[in-house]
Amino acid sequence: MESLLLFNFWGPEMFVIIFAILLLFGGKKIPELMRGIGKGIREFNTARSTIEQEMKDGMRESERKKIEDNKEQAAEG
């Protein structure tokens, strides 16, 4: 379980972090902040998926061209 955590904050450290967030943003701003973070994460994941799909498509196209070139060379030679 510990290997899945980026930082191992439990106990007093966690309370200090939560208190600092409450002081900085206030109780009413925290839901808005979390929505913004969620939206940012969603946009990042969408962009990552798009780039990943474009890379896969490019690799497929490259493989398709190699196969076509090999067929043309075999037909000529």
Image (cartoon, rainbow, N blue to C red):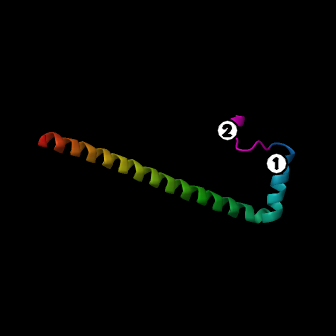
45 falls in the magenta region = no
Q: Which residues are magenta?
A: 1-9
Front: mark 2 or 1: 2
Residue at the front extreme of this rendering? 77
Left or right: 70 in relation to 20? left
Please state the horizontal and vertical placement of residue 68, each as a whole percent of the image. 22, 45
Which of the 4 image quadrants contains residue 25?
bottom right
Q: Quadrant of the N terminus?
A: top right
| Category of crowding for the residue at label 1, using alpha-carbon neighbours closer than 10 angstroms: few (below 14), some (14–19), many (at least 20) | few
- Nearest the eye: 41 or 61: 61
Write the residue at 50% across / 57% down: 47
Which of the 4 image quadrants contains residue 11?
top right
Q: Quadrant of the C terminus?
A: top left
Residue at the right extreme of this rendering? 12
Q: Is residue 19 above or below residue 60?
A: below
Tag 2 residue? 4
Left or right: 76 in relation to 47? left
> Could you tell which of marks 2 and 1 lies nearer the N-terminus?
2
Tag 1 residue? 14
Left or right: 63 in relation to 8? left
Q: CA distance from mark 2 to mark 1?
A: 17 Å
